Image: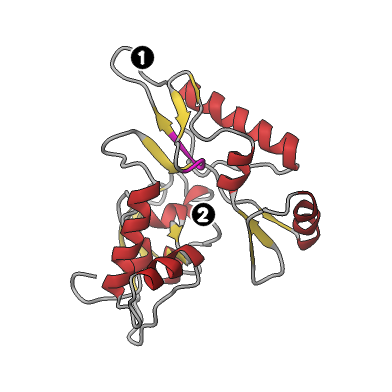
């Protein structure tokens, strides 16, 4: 954005490295990084050679890629080549982002305007990993059939859902978790962020450090609550080592 290139501004302020971004196919505010990745250069640990993977080779899906499956522990990502649009149009499909831009009174937003808006939203609702340990969004937003979504909507009129191109619906995992009363709660030194229920945080300190076991215990308790109330199984985003 600082150099005048557009196409990645919706992903502003996502903590992490460029090399890690294809693994998770990171996404936010209506954009996934796979939409702009042209190629990924890797060192194949088994074949002991350099390889170039095209976008199709990466097998990108929602928060998923070949690097989480066939190439997990088998390839090291060295660099990522992006293909950014010469004819850029702002992506304001995400309602919260559109509202943020509208409230600023900007009629024709630039990539910088969108980047600033995304940063403002993320700063308001998400914890800074430099100040409180967290792994970002801990669960994927579940995707369900239209029939399942309609049945849930009949029981829960405030259900948050987003239509997908194939006719399915993506549900807001944070809303589901919040409805189960987890926002702001803790189990041991692992807790649920008070502003965004999708984020698990480390509330431990020197005297009571948070353990991996506490994080997973909390995650499993949340999964159980959501399944018992909504019949939805939440899938973790982070790779657990």
Quadrant of residue 84 within the rendered picture: bottom left
Q: Earlier in the sequence, mark 2 or mark 1?
A: 2
Q: Residue at x 65, y 72 (%)?
A: 165
In the rendered view, tell whether residue 153 sits above or below residue 198.
below
Which structural element holds mark 1?
Answer: loop
Residue range of the region highlighted in magenta in the rendering = 196-200
Q: Residue at x 28, y 16 (%)?
A: 206
Relative placement, left or right, of 157 versus 124 is right
Residue at the extreme left of the image, as rendered = 3
Residue under numbered circle 1 = 208
Q: Residue 76's x, y, as percent?
A: 35, 50
Which structural element holds mark 2?
Answer: loop
In the rendered view, tell whether residue 25 sits above or below residue 81.
above
CA–CA distance in space, label 2 to label 1: 32 Å
Residue under numbered circle 2 = 63
Relative placement, left or right, of 177 versus 123 is right
The chief SS type of the magenta part is loop
Q: Residue at x 58, y 40 (%)?
A: 178
Mark closer to the observer (2, 1): 1
Q: Front-most of 238 and 76?
A: 238
């Amino acid at each position: 954005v600082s150099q005048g290139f557009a196409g990645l501004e919706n992903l502003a302020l996502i903590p992490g490295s460029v090399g890690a971004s294809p693994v998770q196919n990171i996404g936010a505010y209506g954009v996934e990084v796979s939409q702009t990745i042209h190629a990924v250069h890797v060192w194949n640990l088994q074949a002991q050679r350099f390889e170039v993977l095209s976008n199709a080779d990466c097998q990108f899906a929602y928060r998923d890629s070949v690097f989480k499956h066939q190439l997990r522990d088998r390839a090291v990502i060295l660099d990522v080549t992006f293909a950014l649009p010469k004819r850029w149009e702002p992506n304001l499909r995400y309602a919260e982002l559109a509202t943020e831009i509208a409230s600023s009174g900007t009629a024709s937003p630039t990539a910088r305007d969108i980047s600033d808006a995304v940063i403002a939203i993320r700063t308001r609702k998400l914890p800074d990993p430099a100040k409180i340990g967290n792994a970002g969004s801990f669960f994927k937003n579940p995707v369900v059939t239209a029939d399942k979504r309609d049945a849930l909507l009949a029981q829960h009129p405030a259900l948050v859902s987003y239509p997908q191109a194939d006719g399915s619906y993506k549900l807001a995992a944070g809303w589901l978790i919040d409805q189960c009363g987890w926002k702001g709660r803790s189990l041991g030194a692992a807790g649920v962020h008070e502003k965004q229920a999708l984020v698990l945080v480390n509330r431990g300190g020197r005297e009571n450090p948070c353990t991996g076991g506490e994080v997973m215990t909390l995650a499993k308790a949340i999964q159980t609550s959501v399944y018992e109330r909504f019949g939805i199984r939440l899938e973790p985003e982070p790779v657990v080592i």
